[in-house]
Amino acid sequence: MTEIPPFQQLLTMTDLLVPAAVRAAATLGIADHVAAGATTADEIARRAGSAPDVTDMLLRYLVDIALLDRDENGGYALTALAEPLRSDHPQSVRAMLRNDGMFGSSGLSLLRLDHTVRTGRPGYVAEFGRDYWDAVNNDPAFVAEWREQGEAADRMDLHWDAGIVVTEYDWSGVRSFVDVGGHLGNLTLALVRAHAHLRGTLLDLKNVSAEAGRRFARSEVADRCAAVEGSFLDQLPEGHDVYLLSAILADWSDDDATLILKRCAEAAGASGKVLVADIAMPVGGAGSELRLRSMMPAPTRTAEDIERLAGAAGLRLSWRGPDTAVRTLLEFVGH
Protein backbone atom coordinates (compact mmCIF):
# COMPACT_ATOMS: atom_id res chain seq x y z
CA MET A 1 0.00 0.00 0.00
CA THR A 2 1.35 3.40 -0.98
CA GLU A 3 1.78 5.71 1.97
CA ILE A 4 -0.02 9.04 1.60
CA PRO A 5 2.56 11.85 1.78
CA PRO A 6 2.13 14.40 4.59
CA PHE A 7 1.28 17.28 2.24
CA GLN A 8 -1.60 15.28 0.79
CA GLN A 9 -2.81 14.31 4.27
CA LEU A 10 -2.84 17.98 5.27
CA LEU A 11 -4.77 19.00 2.16
CA THR A 12 -7.30 16.26 2.81
CA MET A 13 -7.68 17.21 6.47
CA THR A 14 -8.35 20.86 5.62
CA ASP A 15 -10.65 20.43 2.63
CA LEU A 16 -13.74 22.56 3.33
CA LEU A 17 -15.82 21.30 0.41
CA VAL A 18 -17.78 18.60 2.26
CA PRO A 19 -18.87 20.74 5.24
CA ALA A 20 -19.49 23.70 2.91
CA ALA A 21 -21.72 21.59 0.65
CA VAL A 22 -23.69 20.15 3.56
CA ARG A 23 -24.15 23.61 5.07
CA ALA A 24 -25.21 25.00 1.69
CA ALA A 25 -27.81 22.23 1.40
CA ALA A 26 -29.08 23.04 4.90
CA THR A 27 -29.18 26.77 4.24
CA LEU A 28 -31.02 26.41 0.93
CA GLY A 29 -33.45 23.85 2.31
CA ILE A 30 -32.56 21.25 -0.32
CA ALA A 31 -33.90 18.34 1.73
CA ASP A 32 -37.20 20.14 2.32
CA HIS A 33 -37.62 20.86 -1.38
CA VAL A 34 -36.86 17.28 -2.42
CA ALA A 35 -39.18 15.89 0.28
CA ALA A 36 -41.91 18.23 -1.01
CA GLY A 37 -41.65 16.73 -4.48
CA ALA A 38 -39.01 18.78 -6.30
CA THR A 39 -36.78 16.20 -7.98
CA THR A 40 -35.02 18.06 -10.80
CA ALA A 41 -32.22 20.57 -10.50
CA ASP A 42 -34.32 23.30 -12.17
CA GLU A 43 -37.27 22.80 -9.84
CA ILE A 44 -35.08 22.62 -6.74
CA ALA A 45 -33.27 25.81 -7.81
CA ARG A 46 -36.60 27.56 -8.43
CA ARG A 47 -37.86 26.71 -4.96
CA ALA A 48 -34.53 27.54 -3.32
CA GLY A 49 -34.15 30.81 -5.22
CA SER A 50 -30.68 29.75 -6.33
CA ALA A 51 -28.68 29.75 -9.56
CA PRO A 52 -29.77 26.68 -11.60
CA ASP A 53 -26.34 25.81 -13.00
CA VAL A 54 -24.54 25.94 -9.64
CA THR A 55 -27.46 24.22 -7.93
CA ASP A 56 -27.02 21.35 -10.38
CA MET A 57 -23.34 21.16 -9.43
CA LEU A 58 -24.23 21.08 -5.74
CA LEU A 59 -26.84 18.36 -6.23
CA ARG A 60 -24.46 16.17 -8.18
CA TYR A 61 -21.84 16.58 -5.46
CA LEU A 62 -24.41 15.68 -2.81
CA VAL A 63 -24.85 12.43 -4.73
CA ASP A 64 -21.08 11.89 -4.52
CA ILE A 65 -21.14 12.24 -0.72
CA ALA A 66 -24.22 10.00 -0.32
CA LEU A 67 -26.77 12.65 0.67
CA LEU A 68 -28.80 12.24 -2.53
CA ASP A 69 -29.60 9.48 -4.99
CA ARG A 70 -30.04 10.24 -8.69
CA ASP A 71 -32.03 8.12 -11.12
CA GLU A 72 -31.40 7.59 -14.82
CA ASN A 73 -33.71 10.50 -15.70
CA GLY A 74 -31.77 12.96 -13.52
CA GLY A 75 -34.28 12.98 -10.68
CA TYR A 76 -33.04 13.35 -7.13
CA ALA A 77 -34.17 11.62 -3.94
CA LEU A 78 -33.02 11.86 -0.33
CA THR A 79 -30.88 9.15 1.19
CA ALA A 80 -31.29 8.10 4.82
CA LEU A 81 -28.23 10.19 5.64
CA ALA A 82 -29.92 13.35 4.32
CA GLU A 83 -33.24 12.89 6.13
CA PRO A 84 -32.16 14.86 9.27
CA LEU A 85 -31.57 17.88 7.01
CA ARG A 86 -35.34 18.18 6.68
CA SER A 87 -36.82 20.90 8.86
CA ASP A 88 -39.62 18.58 10.01
CA HIS A 89 -37.43 15.58 10.88
CA PRO A 90 -37.65 14.50 14.55
CA GLN A 91 -33.87 14.75 14.82
CA SER A 92 -33.48 17.68 12.44
CA VAL A 93 -30.04 19.26 12.34
CA ARG A 94 -30.92 21.91 9.79
CA ALA A 95 -31.01 24.76 12.30
CA MET A 96 -27.56 23.79 13.53
CA LEU A 97 -26.08 23.75 10.03
CA ARG A 98 -27.69 26.60 8.10
CA ASN A 99 -25.31 29.50 7.62
CA ASP A 100 -28.03 32.15 7.90
CA GLY A 101 -29.55 30.97 11.18
CA MET A 102 -28.84 31.84 14.79
CA PHE A 103 -27.44 28.47 15.73
CA GLY A 104 -25.67 27.57 12.51
CA SER A 105 -23.98 30.93 12.10
CA SER A 106 -22.43 30.70 15.56
CA GLY A 107 -20.49 27.62 14.45
CA LEU A 108 -18.88 29.64 11.67
CA SER A 109 -16.67 31.17 14.36
CA LEU A 110 -14.47 28.13 13.82
CA LEU A 111 -13.55 29.47 10.39
CA ARG A 112 -11.49 32.09 12.18
CA LEU A 113 -10.04 29.99 14.98
CA ASP A 114 -6.78 31.78 14.27
CA HIS A 115 -8.40 35.00 15.54
CA THR A 116 -9.47 33.26 18.75
CA VAL A 117 -6.00 31.79 19.32
CA ARG A 118 -4.37 35.13 18.59
CA THR A 119 -6.65 37.35 20.67
CA GLY A 120 -8.65 35.07 22.99
CA ARG A 121 -11.88 36.48 21.52
CA PRO A 122 -14.59 34.70 19.50
CA GLY A 123 -13.91 34.28 15.79
CA TYR A 124 -17.36 35.54 14.77
CA VAL A 125 -16.23 39.19 14.78
CA ALA A 126 -13.27 38.43 12.52
CA GLU A 127 -15.50 36.54 10.08
CA PHE A 128 -18.53 38.85 10.04
CA GLY A 129 -17.28 42.19 11.33
CA ARG A 130 -19.70 42.34 14.27
CA ASP A 131 -20.37 40.60 17.58
CA TYR A 132 -22.61 37.51 17.40
CA TRP A 133 -25.08 38.72 20.02
CA ASP A 134 -25.29 42.13 18.38
CA ALA A 135 -26.09 40.43 15.07
CA VAL A 136 -28.80 38.02 16.20
CA ASN A 137 -30.42 40.45 18.62
CA ASN A 138 -30.59 43.50 16.37
CA ASP A 139 -30.67 42.29 12.75
CA PRO A 140 -34.26 42.13 11.41
CA ALA A 141 -33.30 38.96 9.51
CA PHE A 142 -33.43 37.02 12.78
CA VAL A 143 -36.85 38.23 14.00
CA ALA A 144 -38.75 35.28 12.54
CA GLU A 145 -36.32 32.80 14.05
CA TRP A 146 -36.63 34.43 17.47
CA ARG A 147 -40.39 34.10 17.17
CA GLU A 148 -40.03 30.39 16.40
CA GLN A 149 -37.70 30.02 19.38
CA GLY A 150 -40.20 31.79 21.61
CA GLU A 151 -42.99 29.45 20.58
CA ALA A 152 -40.75 26.45 21.18
CA ALA A 153 -39.68 27.83 24.58
CA ASP A 154 -43.31 27.71 25.73
CA ARG A 155 -42.95 23.93 25.66
CA MET A 156 -39.51 23.73 27.26
CA ASP A 157 -38.31 23.34 30.83
CA LEU A 158 -35.38 25.16 32.37
CA HIS A 159 -32.00 23.77 31.39
CA TRP A 160 -28.39 23.87 32.57
CA ASP A 161 -29.59 23.47 36.18
CA ALA A 162 -31.27 26.90 36.15
CA GLY A 163 -33.91 25.46 38.47
CA ILE A 164 -31.65 26.13 41.45
CA VAL A 165 -32.26 29.84 40.94
CA VAL A 166 -35.95 29.23 41.56
CA THR A 167 -35.68 26.76 44.44
CA GLU A 168 -32.41 27.45 46.28
CA TYR A 169 -32.46 31.22 46.65
CA ASP A 170 -34.56 32.97 49.29
CA TRP A 171 -37.03 35.03 47.30
CA SER A 172 -39.39 35.60 50.24
CA GLY A 173 -38.21 39.15 50.93
CA VAL A 174 -37.84 40.15 47.28
CA ARG A 175 -40.54 42.28 45.68
CA SER A 176 -39.10 42.77 42.20
CA PHE A 177 -36.14 41.56 40.17
CA VAL A 178 -34.53 42.34 36.84
CA ASP A 179 -33.54 39.36 34.68
CA VAL A 180 -30.53 41.05 33.07
CA GLY A 181 -29.98 39.60 29.61
CA GLY A 182 -32.93 37.29 30.29
CA HIS A 183 -33.16 35.92 26.73
CA LEU A 184 -36.64 34.52 25.96
CA GLY A 185 -37.84 34.75 29.55
CA ASN A 186 -37.89 31.11 30.66
CA LEU A 187 -36.35 31.94 34.02
CA THR A 188 -38.42 35.10 34.52
CA LEU A 189 -41.59 33.08 33.95
CA ALA A 190 -40.44 30.24 36.20
CA LEU A 191 -39.72 32.66 39.04
CA VAL A 192 -42.98 34.59 38.93
CA ARG A 193 -44.95 31.36 38.58
CA ALA A 194 -43.22 29.77 41.57
CA HIS A 195 -43.35 32.87 43.81
CA ALA A 196 -46.73 34.60 43.65
CA HIS A 197 -45.46 37.83 45.24
CA LEU A 198 -42.68 38.44 42.71
CA ARG A 199 -42.65 40.90 39.85
CA GLY A 200 -40.05 40.42 37.13
CA THR A 201 -38.59 42.69 34.46
CA LEU A 202 -36.56 41.14 31.67
CA LEU A 203 -33.96 43.33 29.97
CA ASP A 204 -32.35 42.33 26.68
CA LEU A 205 -31.63 43.59 23.18
CA LYS A 206 -34.29 44.38 20.59
CA ASN A 207 -35.16 41.09 18.88
CA VAL A 208 -35.13 38.84 21.92
CA SER A 209 -36.81 41.28 24.33
CA ALA A 210 -39.63 41.78 21.83
CA GLU A 211 -40.23 38.03 21.64
CA ALA A 212 -39.98 37.67 25.42
CA GLY A 213 -42.61 40.38 25.74
CA ARG A 214 -44.93 38.46 23.43
CA ARG A 215 -44.42 35.34 25.54
CA PHE A 216 -45.21 37.22 28.72
CA ALA A 217 -48.34 38.76 27.20
CA ARG A 218 -49.82 35.36 26.35
CA SER A 219 -48.94 33.84 29.74
CA GLU A 220 -51.14 33.62 32.84
CA VAL A 221 -48.71 35.90 34.74
CA ALA A 222 -48.72 38.77 32.25
CA ASP A 223 -49.57 41.26 35.01
CA ARG A 224 -46.37 40.45 36.93
CA CYS A 225 -43.68 40.41 34.26
CA ALA A 226 -42.49 42.81 31.60
CA ALA A 227 -39.79 42.94 28.95
CA VAL A 228 -37.78 46.06 28.14
CA GLU A 229 -35.20 46.71 25.45
CA GLY A 230 -31.73 47.55 26.68
CA SER A 231 -28.10 46.53 26.93
CA PHE A 232 -26.45 45.32 30.10
CA LEU A 233 -23.35 47.22 29.03
CA ASP A 234 -25.30 50.44 29.61
CA GLN A 235 -27.10 51.89 32.62
CA LEU A 236 -29.77 49.56 34.01
CA PRO A 237 -33.17 50.46 35.50
CA GLU A 238 -32.81 51.22 39.20
CA GLY A 239 -35.02 50.52 42.19
CA HIS A 240 -35.34 46.73 42.06
CA ASP A 241 -34.40 44.34 44.85
CA VAL A 242 -32.41 41.77 42.85
CA TYR A 243 -30.47 41.99 39.60
CA LEU A 244 -30.17 38.48 38.19
CA LEU A 245 -27.43 37.41 35.78
CA SER A 246 -28.12 33.88 34.57
CA ALA A 247 -25.79 32.26 32.01
CA ILE A 248 -24.47 35.64 30.87
CA LEU A 249 -20.86 36.16 31.87
CA ALA A 250 -19.40 33.16 29.99
CA ASP A 251 -20.09 35.01 26.74
CA TRP A 252 -17.94 37.97 27.74
CA SER A 253 -14.29 38.74 28.37
CA ASP A 254 -13.09 39.61 31.87
CA ASP A 255 -13.22 43.33 31.11
CA ASP A 256 -16.74 43.18 29.70
CA ALA A 257 -17.96 40.84 32.45
CA THR A 258 -16.64 43.27 35.05
CA LEU A 259 -18.50 46.10 33.32
CA ILE A 260 -21.75 44.08 33.31
CA LEU A 261 -21.36 43.37 37.02
CA LYS A 262 -20.59 47.05 37.63
CA ARG A 263 -23.78 48.09 35.83
CA CYS A 264 -25.74 45.71 38.06
CA ALA A 265 -24.00 47.07 41.16
CA GLU A 266 -24.82 50.64 40.16
CA ALA A 267 -28.49 49.81 39.64
CA ALA A 268 -28.73 47.76 42.84
CA GLY A 269 -27.31 50.58 44.94
CA ALA A 270 -26.90 50.19 48.68
CA SER A 271 -30.00 48.08 49.29
CA GLY A 272 -30.22 45.80 46.26
CA LYS A 273 -28.56 42.45 45.54
CA VAL A 274 -26.81 41.04 42.48
CA LEU A 275 -27.48 37.34 41.99
CA VAL A 276 -25.12 35.57 39.59
CA ALA A 277 -26.12 32.13 38.32
CA ASP A 278 -23.43 31.58 35.74
CA ILE A 279 -22.62 28.39 33.88
CA ALA A 280 -19.37 26.52 33.37
CA MET A 281 -19.60 24.49 30.19
CA PRO A 282 -18.45 20.86 30.39
CA VAL A 283 -15.49 20.15 28.14
CA GLY A 284 -14.14 16.88 26.82
CA GLY A 285 -10.61 17.50 25.65
CA ALA A 286 -8.73 20.09 23.62
CA GLY A 287 -11.08 19.90 20.63
CA SER A 288 -14.13 20.62 22.75
CA GLU A 289 -12.33 23.48 24.48
CA LEU A 290 -11.30 25.06 21.19
CA ARG A 291 -14.83 24.81 19.80
CA LEU A 292 -16.26 26.58 22.84
CA ARG A 293 -13.55 29.26 22.94
CA SER A 294 -14.13 30.05 19.28
CA MET A 295 -17.66 31.13 20.29
CA MET A 296 -17.35 32.45 23.86
CA PRO A 297 -14.45 34.01 25.80
CA ALA A 298 -14.91 32.28 29.16
CA PRO A 299 -16.92 29.05 29.01
CA THR A 300 -15.35 27.47 32.12
CA ARG A 301 -15.11 30.18 34.80
CA THR A 302 -15.19 28.97 38.40
CA ALA A 303 -17.10 30.53 41.28
CA GLU A 304 -13.80 31.99 42.49
CA ASP A 305 -13.25 33.60 39.07
CA ILE A 306 -16.68 35.22 39.26
CA GLU A 307 -16.01 36.45 42.81
CA ARG A 308 -12.78 38.06 41.60
CA LEU A 309 -14.58 39.87 38.77
CA ALA A 310 -17.34 40.98 41.13
CA GLY A 311 -14.76 42.43 43.49
CA ALA A 312 -13.31 44.47 40.64
CA ALA A 313 -16.85 45.73 39.97
CA GLY A 314 -17.28 46.97 43.53
CA LEU A 315 -19.21 43.97 44.88
CA ARG A 316 -18.60 41.57 47.76
CA LEU A 317 -19.93 38.05 48.21
CA SER A 318 -22.84 37.95 50.66
CA TRP A 319 -24.12 34.38 50.06
CA ARG A 320 -23.02 31.31 48.20
CA GLY A 321 -25.65 28.81 47.16
CA PRO A 322 -25.24 25.21 46.08
CA ASP A 323 -23.06 24.48 43.07
CA THR A 324 -23.88 21.91 40.42
CA ALA A 325 -21.68 20.44 37.72
CA VAL A 326 -22.59 23.32 35.38
CA ARG A 327 -24.03 26.11 37.53
CA THR A 328 -22.92 28.40 40.37
CA LEU A 329 -25.23 30.56 42.49
CA LEU A 330 -23.66 33.61 44.13
CA GLU A 331 -25.23 36.67 45.76
CA PHE A 332 -23.33 39.95 45.93
CA VAL A 333 -23.88 43.31 47.57
CA GLY A 334 -22.05 46.60 47.26
CA HIS A 335 -18.97 47.24 49.36
Image (spheres, rainbow, N blue to C red):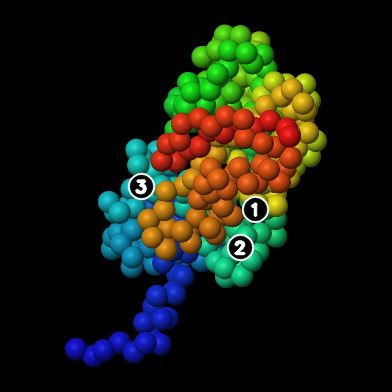
Which of pointers 1 and 2 lies earlier in the amino acid sequence?
Answer: 2
Residue 99 in view in this figure: no
**Crowd rating for badge 3 (residues with CA inside 10 Å; few <14, some 14–19, many 20+):** some
From this view, report whether residue 2 is shown above or below residue 119.
Answer: below
Residue position for label 2: 120
Q: How many angstroms separate mark 3 from mark 1 (CA)?
A: 35 Å
Nearer to the camera, 309 or 288: 309
| Residue 253 numbered mark, or none | 1
Task: Kindly check if marks 1 and 2 are in contact, taking CB atoms under 8 A apart as contact.
Answer: yes
Which of pointers 3 and 1 lies earlier in the amino acid sequence?
Answer: 3
15 left or right of 1? right
| Residue 127 numbered mark, or none | none
Nearer to the camera, 86 or 74: 86
From this view, report whether residue 49 is shown above or below residue 158.
Answer: below
The amino acid sitting under disc 3 is Pro
Residue at image position (74%, 22%) is 271
